[in-house]
Image (cartoon, helix red, strand yellow):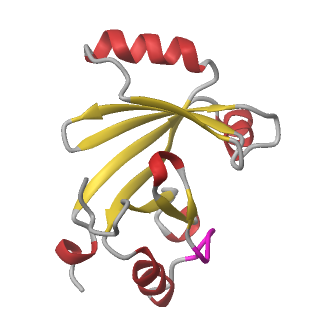
């Protein structure tokens, strides 16, 4: 499967922030758009705010507890780009393809993420330093 079939589109970039409300205000002012959605993901200890930017989104990530992956990221690195995400048609098939291609999977099976999507993360050590998220849109068809 080529890149066109595997990735119908770049989906979003996630940015870790220390003060989510301040970051939402800053990005709203700079981008000239209001957030599309805001939701807590208690299982991950995060709150996510999405800005729709055409077919792609910007995700701001704030931590809701000190032991979350975002809290650890902020402690080690400070604010900044946390991950890039690609929409996929079939997340199970993509995980298998990435694994067989030598990628180190953080999530060996998909899990429910924000916006009702199945997600799985790929470790940055095998992705040239970039934490990578695969996300399957509801219905698994790669479109909204």
Q: Is residue 83 left or right of residue 71?
A: left
Specify the quadrant that holds the N terminus.
Answer: bottom left
Asked whether 119 falls inside the magenta stretch, the response is no
Which residue is at the front of the view, 29 or 129? 29
Vertical position of residue 16 compared to residue 121: above or below: above
Image point 62% across, 18% down: which residue?
Answer: 19
Q: Residue furthest right?
A: 67
Which residue is at the front of the view, 37 or 65? 37
Which residue is at the front of the view, 60 or 128? 60
Bounds of the magenta span?
A: 104-109
Classified by dominant secondary structure, the portion drawn in magenta counts as loop
Q: Residue furthest bottom?
A: 100
- Where's residue 27, x and y in %? 38, 18
Vertical position of residue 23 compared to residue 84: above or below: above
Q: Is residue 126 left or right of residue 63?
A: left
Image point 69% across, 48% down: which residue?
Answer: 44
- Where's residue 61, x and y in %? 56, 34
- Where's residue 142, x and y in %? 27, 64
Q: Quadrant of residue 65?
A: top right
- Where's residue 7, x and y in %? 26, 68
Vertical position of residue 140 compared to residue 68: above or below: below
Q: Residue furthest front?
A: 139
Image point 46% across, 17% down: which residue?
Answer: 24
């Amino acid at each position: 499967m080529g890149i066109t079939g595997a990735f119908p589109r770049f989906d979003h970039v996630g940015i870790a922030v220390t003060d989510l409300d301040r970051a939402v205000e800053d990005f709203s002012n700079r981008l000239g758009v209001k957030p599309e959605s805001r939701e807590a993901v208690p299982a991950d200890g995060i709150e996510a705010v999405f800005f729709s930017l055409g077919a792609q989104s910007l995700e701001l990530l704030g931590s809701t507890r000190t032991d979350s992956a975002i809290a650890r990221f902020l402690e080690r690195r400070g604010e900044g780009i946390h991950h890039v995400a690609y929409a996929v048609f079939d997340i199970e098939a993509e995980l298998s393809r990435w694994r067989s291609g030598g990628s180190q999977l953080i999530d060996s099976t998909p899990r429910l993420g924000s916006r009702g999507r199945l997600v799985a993360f790929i470790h940055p050590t095998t992705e040239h330093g970039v934490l990578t998220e695969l996300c399957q849109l509801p219905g698994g068809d790669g479109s909204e």
